[in-house]
Amino acid sequence: MPWRGEKDPYVIWVSEIMLQQTRVDTVIPYYLRWIEEFPTVYALASASEEGVLLLWEGLGYYARVRNMHLTAKKIVQQLHGEFPRTPDELQELPGIGEYTANAIASICFDFPAVALDANIKRVLARLVDLDEPLANKTALNKLEQFAGNLIIDANAGDVNQALMDLGAMICLPSEPICSICPVQNYCVAFNHHTQHERPVLRPKKLIPEYQVVAAAISTSTGNGMFLLAKRPNGGLLPGLWEFPGGKVEEGENDLQALQREIMEELDTHISVDFMLGAYKHAYTHFKVVVRAYHCQLQGPPPKALEAQELAWVRCDEMNRFAMGKVDRLISRDLCSSVSE
Ligand code: SF4
């Protein structure tokens, strides 16, 4: 991991934020590109929003990158470019929660804090063979106490990073590789043969799946341009560009949903030519199936009733507009259908 051995709080902060909800092997190329483009907090603070979003595109959970941009500006403008050194002060910055604050403070400033994220909790639950769900407060207290006892003098950063690496590379969620584990002798779950039953999980909630339609709208003159809308700053995928559309409501078919959404979002109407494709994607609390259609504008010029702004974009310009995963796939299929 390219950030291991670093004590620069900017570098550790970038890696920790990228690693939230994201696997190490996915993060590494993004991290390397990021550090090359924005090597310091000053470089990030002075970057454009569009540039920051484009570099993050594909990593998901876009609130993370928006908060990073805000935090970088705050550190430069209000803290003379210096990261705070304690978990409490770090948690006052946008997007830095208890785990990240403890990780930065312990790794960079030798602060004696235990950093407990889902990976470390899993490792600890196996090491002590914890037989209750992690969501229980008593379970968390036991893990905090156990991890706290591992910290001696100024080694909190080493303890936290060792647990992070063990969780990322050996003590994996479904298949822990106990045969090469350096702490096998101390692992109570391994000795009790219960490592596959730890941590104890609560039954999973059913995740709803929504049907969604999206319109790749060209002008009726067919000048090779398509309409993109910039999403509002609050909510899902803030500030990213998308093909207009939305959820199919109960009792609607796709064409009815498209006309309604286009009227609500753009105050105009369209004709629908053909379907470009169907795209599945899972967010944290729900899943979507997005069906995208090639359409033509038939009404008055669209208005940005819900979007921050609208843009007519040619296919060879689409890559300059930061998008979520599904819209990027739609743009690729759209542009290859246009060039055929
Ligand atoms: Fe995880 Fe197995 Fe190591 Fe225990 S012995 S910490 S279950 S990898």
Image: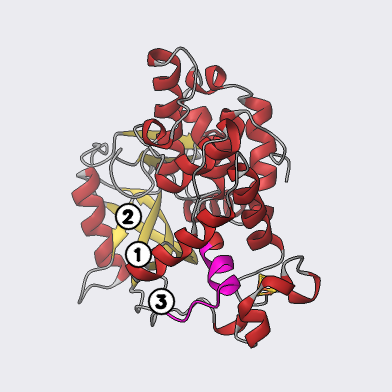
Alpha carbon of mark 1 to alpha carbon of mark 3: how far?
35 Å
Residue 222 seen: no
Q: Which mark is residue 72?
A: none
| Range shown magenta | 121-132
154 vs 247, nearest the viewer: 154
Name the residue carrying label 2.
245
**Residue found at the far right of this picture:** 180
**Mark 3–mark 2 contact, CB under 8 Å?**
no
Question: Left or right of 149: which side holds 80?
Answer: left
Alpha carbon of mark 3 to alpha carbon of mark 2: how far?
40 Å
168 vs 238, nearest the viewer: 168
**Residue found at the far bottom of this picture:** 193
**Mark 2–mark 1 contact, CB under 8 Å?**
yes
Q: Which amino acid is tagged 3?
A: Pro
Where's residue 194, x and y in %? Answer: 60, 85
Where's residue 88, x and y in %? Answer: 37, 35
The answer to whether residue 187 is above or below residue 68 is below
Name the residue carrying label 3.
133
